[in-house]
Image: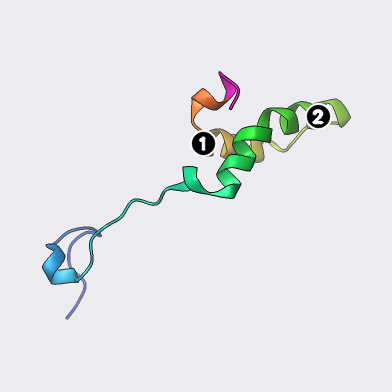
Amino acid sequence: MPWRGVAGEGRVEERGWAYRRRRPEGTVLYEAVRDNLATLLEEASEVGRGLPRYVERDFARYRPSCWMCSPA
């Protein structure tokens, strides 16, 4: 049968599984970025030209804005 519809459509009984949101905030990577991103950005700018813009942009998208507001 050809694919029809959008991901997540349909009843659980039809698919045999239910959608579960990923929880990146529970990973070691998320914690490491949260705890060290400000230091990384600061030291990279002191040493040279800093990080490429796309790296800073991607980190900004990855992290909630509240990370930079208060310490972990």
Mark 1–mark 2 Cα distance, whole angstroms, equals: 20 Å
**What predominant SS class does the magenta segment belong to?**
loop
In terms of depth relative to the viewer, which is nearer, 51 or 10?
10
In terms of depth relative to the viewer, which is nearer, 71 or 13?
71
In terms of depth relative to the viewer, which is nearer, 43 or 52?
43
Q: Is residue 58 above or below residue 65?
A: below
Considering every residue shown, the one lying at the far top of the view is 69
Q: Which amino acid, mark 2?
A: Glu
**What's the magenta region?**
68-72
- Residue 36 sits in quarter: top right
Q: Position of residue 53 (x, y in %)?
A: 67, 35
Q: Which mark is residue 61?
A: 1
What residue appears at the point 85 percent right and 25 percent down from the top-left corner? 46
Please give left or right for residue 58 compared with residue 22 in the image.
right
The C terminus, quarter of image? top right
Q: Which mark is residue 40?
A: none
Q: Nearer the viewer, mark 1 or mark 2?
A: 2
Q: Position of residue 66 (x, y in %)?
A: 50, 23
Which is nearer the N-term, disc 1 or disc 2?
2
Badge 2, how many Cα within 10 Å: few under 14, some, many 20+? few
- Residue 38 sits in quarter: top right
Q: Is residue 10 above or below residue 56?
A: below
Which structural element holds mark 1?
Answer: helix
Does residue 69 show up magenta in the picture?
Answer: yes
